[in-house]
């Protein structure tokens, strides 16, 4: 089974909303939208 955990930082969107406006690629998951578990990787 593979449990994909959505990145808590970007809520699984892969990007984060900047307070100044616009959006930026989530550096936590690097735009993948999921936490780096290392299990769901080809
Ligand atoms: Zn993220």
Image (tube, rainbow, N blue to C red):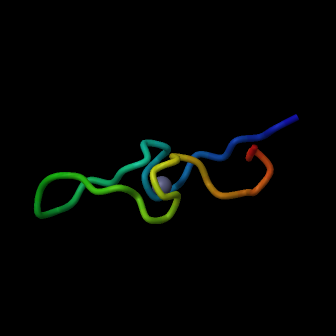
Residue placed most toward the observer, 28 or 11: 28
Left or right: residue 26 compared with residue 20: right
Residue 14, x across and y down, in percent = 43, 47
The image position of residue 28, as x and y in percent, is 49, 64
Say which residue appears at 51% left-offset and 46% top-offset. Answer: 33
On the picture, is 16 further left or further right than 37? Answer: left
The furthest residue to the top: 1
Residue depicted at x 54% and y 52%:
7
Residue at the extreme front? 42
Outermost left residue: 20
Q: Position of residue 22 (x, y in %)?
A: 16, 52
Q: Is residue 28 above or below residue 31?
A: below
Quarter that holds the C terminus: top right
Decide if residue 27 is on the left or right side of residue 38. left
The quadrant the N terminus occupies is top right
Q: How many marks?
A: 0
Residue drawn 36% across the image and 50% down it: 15
What residue is at 58 percent from the left and 46 percent from the top?
A: 6
């Amino acid at each position: 089974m593979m449990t994909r955990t959505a990145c808590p930082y970007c809520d699984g969107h892969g990007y984060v909303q900047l307070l100044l406006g616009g959006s930026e690629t989530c550096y936590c998951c690097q735009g993948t939208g999921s936490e780096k578990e290392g299990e769901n990787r080809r």
